[in-house]
Amino acid sequence: MEEKLVVTKIRNGIVIDHIPAGKALKVLKVLGITGSEGLRVALVMNVESRKLGRKDIVKIEEKYLSMKELSLIALIAPTATINIIKEYKVVEKQKVKPPSIVKGLIKCPNPTCISRKKNEPIKSLFKLKSTNPIMLECQYCGYVLRGDEIEDYIET
Ligand code: CTP
Ligand code: ZN
C-alpha cells in the first residue's frame, strides 16, 4: 500500500475499493445505507489511484454483502474490488462482475411495462447489453436503462 491512509483501517467488515471517482454515494444508496442504521461507515472520495487516476473507497464495519448487493455494486461501479476484513487482515478480495441477467432487482422505468403492473406476478428482467457504459435492456418492453439511472429504480 503506497497511498497515504486517509481514513483508519477497519477491524471487521468490508472495504469497497476502486470505485469510479464520484460514485461512492451511489454505492451507499444502492446498499440502502442512509446513516440511521448506526453502521460505522467511512467514505473516501476522489483520491489518487494508479489504476483509475482517481477513485472512491467505502468502508463499512460489521457489514457483509448479499448476492443482490454485489450485483448492484457491479452495475454502479464495475471497477470495484470488495475486500473482506477480519481482525484487520484482508481475508478475501473479489472483483465485482456485472451480471448478464438482472432479475427482480431493478424496476423498469417504463410505467406501462407489464413488469410494473401490480396484479401481474411478473418479476422485472433485464439483460446486460453493454458493460462500458453499463446498459440494461428490459426483456418485456425493450426499455434501455443506463447504469447511472439504476440507483433511482432499485426494487424495495
Ligand atoms: N483496508 C482497511 N482496513 C484493513 C485492511 C485494509 O481499510 N484492516 C483497506 C486498505 O486501506 C485498502 C483496501 O482495504 O484501501 C485493500 O487493502 P490491501 O489489499 O491491503 O491494499 P492494496 O494491496 O493496495 O489493494 P489492491 O491491490 O486491491 O489495490
Ligand atoms: Zn420494461
Image: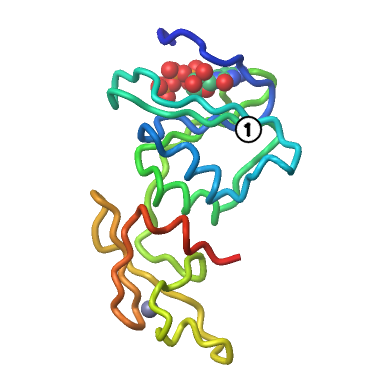
Q: Residue at x 39, y 20 (%)?
A: 47
In which quadrant of the rendered image does the N terminus lie?
top left
Disc 1 Cβ-to-ligand 1 distance below 8 Å: no
The chosen color scheme is: rainbow
126 vs 87, left or right, is left
Q: Residue at x 52, y 13 (%)?
A: 6
Q: Residue at x 47, y 59 (%)?
A: 152
40 vs 138, left or right, is right
Q: Residue furthest right?
A: 38
Q: Residue at x 47, y 53 (%)?
A: 72
Quadrant for ligand 2? bottom left
The answer to whether residue 73 shows anywhere in this view is yes
Whole-percent x, y for residue 91 in the image: 58, 26
Whole-percent x, y for residue 135 in the image: 28, 60
Mark 1 lies on residue: 60
Whole-percent x, y for residue 92 in the image: 54, 31
Q: Residues within 10 Å of mark 1 (few under 14, many from 20)?
A: many
Residue type pointed to by label 1? Ile
In which quadrant of the rendered image does the C terminus lie?
bottom right
The answer to whether residue 89 shows anywhere in this view is no
Foreground pick, 19 / 127: 19
Whole-percent x, y for residue 43 in the image: 54, 28
The correct choice, above or below, for 4 with respect to 55 in the image is above
144 vs 32, left or right, is left
45 vs 34, left or right, is left
Q: Residue furthest bottom?
A: 119
Q: Label 1: state its secondary structure.
A: strand
Q: How many marks?
A: 1
Task: Tell me the quarter of the picture where residue 119 sits.
Answer: bottom right
